[in-house]
Structure formats: structure tokens, C-alpha cells
Amino acid sequence: MPTRTARTAWNGTLEKGSGQVELTSSKQGTFEVSFPKRAADEAGGTTSPEELVAAAHTSCYAMQLSALIAAAGGTPESLEVSADVSLGPDASDGGFQLTGIKLTVRGEVEGLDAAGFEKAAQDAKAGCPISKALTGVEITLDASLVS
């Protein structure tokens, strides 16, 4: 399997510095990052590690779920997946940590009932490689079929 690469160039201190995250393997873009904007409620045109984790998680989860729906005899017509990744204080060392991830999926699926979709959705949450990498963070799931 391939290895994918991203890189960050950072200048300055945590509080006053900023950087650029480059999606090196895909060459799809370079994105601004800064800690003050990372910690603010409004992103102000910059991304953050949490947003990048959310993007990785939603895309991985959608792929895993589509495979499990097909394996269960269904056909995924469309899946809409979002992830809310929260950052908060780490009481154990005074730094920060991811405090939770909320996955939400709405699916249009042929050939599975709500119970079959829920099972596939839960199994995808457990089996997605990004979920596996994030086992130290509580991941919740809100899954439902859309008619």
C-alpha cells in the first residue's frame, strides 16, 4: 500500500507564528494554519489539525461504510458524512488534546433496512483505519437512512 505525505512549514512562536500545510502527495493545495485561529471559535480562513483529522475521518469512514453496505447486500446511492472534532485542555499535562469526535452519516441505500444500515454504520466506525488510529478519543456516531 502507498504512503501519503503532507508537510508543514512553520515560522515563529506558537502564539505569534503561523504556517502552511501542504498536501504533498496529491499536490491539491497549501493551507494556512495558526494557533490563535486554531483555538478561536471562528477559523478565519485557516485550517487546523482538527479540521484535517475531520476530513481524513469522513473520507475514510465513507469508503469503509460503502464497502460494508455492499457486503451486506445493499447498494449505497449516496452517503453524507460529517465529523466534528473537538479540541480541549488536557488536564494530565496542561496541554491540549482531542476531546471527542462526533460522526454523523445520512445515507440513501437500496436493499438495507434501518437496522442493517445501523449495523454497517457501527461496523464502519469500528473498522475504518482512521477510527482505529484514533482509539484514544471518544468517537460517537449518529447514523440514519434518508428516504
Image (cartoon, grey):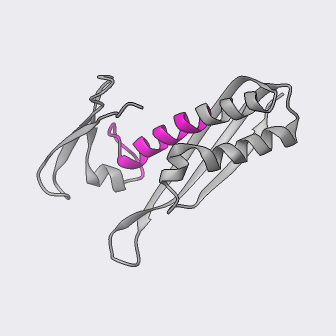
Does 121 sit above or below residue 138?
A: above
Q: Residue at x 79, y 31 (%)?
A: 146
Query: On the rendered structure, is 121 left or right of 24?
Result: right
Q: Nearer the viewer, residue 115 or 86?
A: 115
Q: Nearer the viewer, residue 47 or 125?
A: 125
Query: On the rendered structure, is 1 left or right of 46?
Result: right
Report the magenta residues as a range.
41-62
User: Quadrant of the image for the C terminus?
Assistant: top right
User: Quadrant of the image for the N terminus?
Assistant: top left
Residue 94 position within the rendered picture, expressed as x and y whole percent measured from the top left: 33, 75
Spot the residue most to the bottom. Answer: 92
Q: Residue at x 64, y 55 (%)?
A: 140
Q: Residue at x 51, y 42 (%)?
A: 57
Residue 99 position within the rendered picture, expressed as x and y whole percent measured from the top left: 49, 63
Does 102 sit above or below residue 99?
A: above
Give the quarter of the image for residue 88. Answer: bottom left
Query: On the rendered structure, is 73 left or right of 14?
Result: right
Q: Residue at x 86, y 25 (%)?
A: 111
The total of numbered circles placed on residues is 0
Q: Taken as a whole, is the magenta stretch helix, strand or loop?
A: helix
Spot the residue most to the left. Answer: 12
Does 85 sit above or below residue 9?
A: below
Q: Is residue 45 magenta?
A: yes
Give the quarter of the image for residue 6. Answer: top left
Does 103 sit above or below residue 140?
A: above
Residue 61 position within the rendered picture, expressed as x and y whole percent measured from the top left: 59, 39
Q: Nearer the viewer, residue 118 or 64?
A: 64
Residue 60 position within the rendered picture, expressed as x and y whole percent measured from the top left: 54, 36
Give the quarter of the image for residue 39. Answer: bottom left
